[in-house]
Image (cartoon, rainbow, N blue to C red):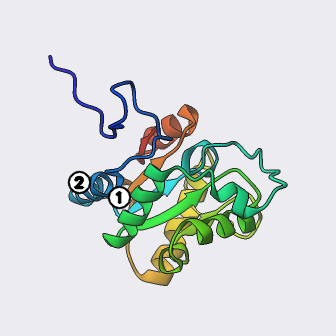
Amino acid sequence: MMARPPLFFSSSSQSKPSMDDDFSDEEPVARRMCVELKRAGIKLICADFDLTLIRVHTGGVWQRTAEALSRSVRPCVRALLQEALEAGLHVAVVTFSPQAKLIREVLALAFPSAFATQIVVRALDRSWRYDGEGTADGKLPHIASAVEELTRSRGDAIAKKHVLLVDDDPDNVRTALRHGVNAVI
């Protein structure tokens, strides 16, 4: 069986790609990914923040500026989320960090304002709650709350099968998959 080529690759080397690579072709690849995600029925991409959207783990206690942190945004993830929004998909950031204000500031610096304001943020900041009957495991309450907000504010019905979680933590991915939510590392 022939190995599948990597989805992202760096033209500067043939070594294993890193999500930190500066991809010259990131937008076309992200665009193709979004076409395929829509074809698969995905309506909402939920991205983790620490070590997924950004290259560092803030531990929820980032003391420097949002501008400094925005320099850690991964180009390939930024391209994916921006292309998703352009394609009419919804985007949320779901994180165990309590620094929602900082995350919104980073999004405002990393994305054009028309896109940054469309991204739902669910952090552990007590600004939201989920009272539904779903599980409280992993990022599932964050996702369910984001779905509720999108349903209420934009009128789009989103089921678990329409969600894709992108997270660096295998436990969060396993939990999502176990409960019927699409998820990738």
**Relative to the observer, which residue lies in front, 133 or 81?**
81
Q: Which mark is residue 162?
A: 1
The kind of residue on which mark 2 rests is: Glu
- Answer whether residue 130 is visible to the viewer in this image: no
Of the residues tagged 1 and 2, which is closer to the observer?
2
Count of labels in the image: 2
- Mark 1 burial class by Cα count in 10 Å: few <14, some 14-19, many 20+: some
Dividing the picture into quadrants, the one containing residue 57 is: top right
Q: Are marks 1 and 2 in contact (CB under 8 Å)?
A: no
Give percent across and percent down for residue 134.
55, 54
Give percent across and percent down for residue 48.
57, 50
What residue is drawn where x is 57% and y is 33%?
171
The kind of residue on which mark 1 rests is: His
Q: CA distance from mark 1 to mark 2?
A: 13 Å
- Answer whether residue 26 is visible to the viewer in this image: yes
- Mark 2 burial class by Cα count in 10 Å: few <14, some 14-19, many 20+: few
SS type, badge 2 = helix
Is 119 placed left or right of 13 in the picture? Answer: right
Q: Which mark is residue 36?
A: 2
Give percent across and percent down for residue 36.
23, 54
Dividing the picture into quadrants, the one containing residue 41 is: bottom left
